[in-house]
Image (spheres, grey):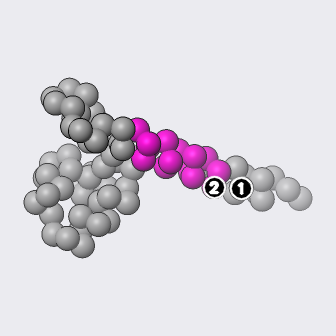
Amino acid sequence: MIFIAGVFVPIEALPLQVRVISYLTPLTYMIDALRDAMIAPSPMYAVDPAALLTWFVVLQALAIIVLNRKTQF
């Protein structure tokens, strides 16, 4: 995930298929939010925290569902 998230190579330089996959990973939004906080804020600064919050809610719900199924006898 680190190689397609824009850490080493800018996302704009990736092929289209890899770029689509990159936007489906939460690390991409974290890197973009950190870059906006340290270098220069972009006009779409609210997209990254919203995407990270969405990822958190979805993964937290999946974890609760899986743990409930595992703990029931």
Residue marked by disc 1 = 65
Residue 31 appears in view: no
Q: Position of residue 6 (x, y in %)?
A: 21, 50
Give the left or right position of residue 27, taking residue 18 as reference: right
Above or below: residue 1 compared with residue 41: below
Q: Position of residue 60 (x, y in %)?
A: 61, 47
Quarter of the image that includes the C terminus: bottom right
Give the left or right position of residue 8, taking residue 49 as reference: left
Q: Nearer the viewer, residue 29 or 40?
A: 40
Magenta segment: 49-62
For label 1, the SS is helix
For label 2, the SS is helix
In the image, what residue type sits under mark 2? Answer: Leu
Q: Is residue 64 found inside the magenta-colored segment of the image?
A: no
Name the residue rendered at 42%, 47% in the picture.
Answer: 51
Residue marked by disc 2 = 62
Give the left or right position of residue 49, taking residue 7 as reference: right
In the image, what residue type sits under mark 1? Answer: Ile
Q: Nearer the viewer, residue 46 or 3?
A: 46
Main secondary structure type of the part rendered in magenta:
helix
Q: Position of residue 41 (x, y in %)?
A: 21, 32
Q: Position of residue 21 (x, y in %)?
A: 32, 65
Quarter of the image that includes the N terminus: bottom left
Residue 45 appears in view: yes
Q: Nearer the viewer, residue 52 or 65?
A: 52
Q: Residue furthest top?
A: 38
Q: Could you tell me if the residues under marks 2 and 1 are in contact, i.e. CB atoms within 8 Å?
A: yes
Name the residue rendered at 24%, 68% in the picture.
Answer: 18
